[in-house]
Image: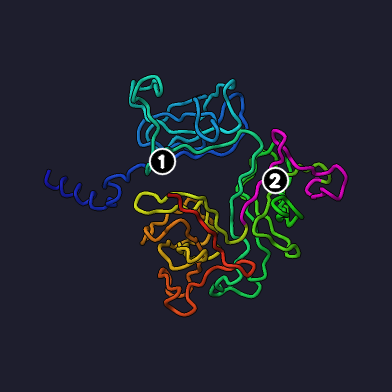
Amino acid sequence: MRKLSLALLSLLALVPFAAVGAQDAIVPSVTVTDQFVQDDTVTINEVVSAAPGWIVIHIDNEGRPGPVAGYAPVVEGSNADVVITLDMTMATPKLFAMLHDDTGEAGVYEFGTVEGADRPVAVDGKVVTPAFWTVTHMRASSQAVIGGDNVPVVEGASAADMMMAPVVTIESVLSDVAGFVVIHIDNDGAPGPVAGWGWFAEGLTEAIEINLDLGVDPTAVVWPMLHVDTGVIGEYEFGMVEGADLPISVDGAVVTFPIAAMPSLTVASQALGEGGTLTIKEAVIDADGWLVIHVSDNGAPGRVIGGVALAAGAHSNVVITLDDAAAAGEQVFPMLHYDTNVIGEYEFGTVEGADAPVFVAEAVVVVPLTVEG
C-alpha cells in the first residue's frame, strides 16, 4: 500500500497545477448577431451564464427593453446557438437578448409574475442585454481613419505607409439582397459625393473594409449608405446608369447615418456627477493621447482641471473625475491632446513641445460643454 501511495503521489505531481486549482469565475455574457426571423425563431450565438437561467427576448420600447416576446432556458457555462421562439404578434424590428437568473421555481420563468424571481443578470452594474435587428440593418461606428494634422509619426512607418488610402470599416450589414455600402462625404449635414464603396452579399456580412478615394477631399464626418446591386453585379453604377443600384430604404427611410472619420469630440450639457465627474459622449482619436478638461477663461480654454489617457480609437461615455470640480463653473472645454513625450504622463505646458493639442483642418479639437447647476 505504501508503494502504491508513493506511485500515486508521483503521478499527481505530474498534473499541472491549473488542472487541480480553483476554476476561474464565470463572467456572464450574451453574443448575438443581426438576423432575419426564421420560422418565428431567432438564434443567440452564445450565452455564458454563471448558473442555470434564462435568455429572454424583449421587444423594443423606445430604445429600451420592453415586454417579453420569448425565452429559453440556459445551463451554467457556455450555451451555443440557443434557439428562441418568438410571439410574432409582439416582435419589433429591434430586439434585446437579456440574461435572467432562475431563482424562483426551477425551470419556470417567473419574472414579472412572482416578486423577486428570475431577475436580469448584471455585470459591473449593467444588465447583460445586447440589442440586435431583424430587418435590413447596418452597424458602423466612428473611427479616426483620417489623422489629425499633427499626428505623431509611428516609429518604423515608411513613406508608402503614410500615403496609403484611409480605410473605413463597416462592422456588419444584414440585408435580404446583395448590394453596396457606399461612403459619402458630408455636405452641410447630409450625404455628399461618393468617396468609396464596398460590396456585401445577401444575409449577414461582417467586417467590410472600404478604401477611400484620395482624390476626394475628406470631411470630419462621413455617411455610410446601403445601395442594392441591380445593374452589373459587383459594379457600383448609381448615378451613371439610370435606375441602377438605388439606395435601400427601411420603413421609408434610406439606411444611412453619419459617423466621425477624424479626431473629434461629442458632448452634451450636464450637471457634475457624484465625486465631481463629467461624461463625454464620444471621443475619437487617431493615436494614443489624452482627453483633458480646461476651465473657461473668458470663453476660451484655460487651465486643466482633469483628464484621462485615451488609446487610439473611438471611445463612448468617457468619465473624467475633475481634480478641482469647484473651478468648473458654468462652462468647460474638453480637448484632445496627443501623448508624445513620456508615454502615460501628461506634460503639455510643462515640457516644451510635449503632448500638443490635436489639430484637424488647422483647428484644435475642442468643444464647449455647459455645466448645469
Judged from the image, the secondary structure of the residue bearing numbered disc 1 is strand
How many other residues sit within 10 Å of disc 1, few (<14), some (14-19) or many (≥20)? few
Question: Going 54% across and 59% down the picture, which residue do you hit?
Answer: 367
Q: Say which mark, if any, is on residue 126.
A: 1
Point out residue 30 in the picture as x, y percentages from the top left corner.
Answer: 46, 38
Where residue 244 sits, quadrant-wise, is top right
Total count of labels: 2
Amino acid type of disc 2?
Phe
Q: Main secondary structure of the magenta part?
A: loop
Q: Nearer the viewer, residue 361 or 271?
A: 271
Is there a contact, CB below 8 Å, between mark 2 and mark 1?
A: no
Amino acid type of disc 1?
Lys
User: Spatial distance from mark 2 to mark 1, Cα to Cα?
Assistant: 34 Å
Lower position in the chain sequence, tag 2 or tag 1: 1
Q: Nearer the viewer, residue 285 or 23?
A: 285
Point out residue 143 in the picture as x, y percentages from the top left corner.
Answer: 59, 56
| Magenta residues (range) | 233-260
Q: Is residue 373 left or right of residue 255?
A: left
Question: Against 45, is 264 above or below?
Answer: below
Point out residue 275 in the picture as x, y percentages from the top left corner.
Answer: 34, 52
Q: Nearer the viewer, residue 173 or 274?
A: 274
Question: Going 45% across and 63% down the picture, which residue do you hit?
Answer: 295
The residue where tag 2 is placed is 200
Question: Against 12, is 71 above or below?
Answer: above
Q: Is residue 359 left or right of residue 66?
A: right
In the image, residue 167 lies in the stretch drawn in magenta: no
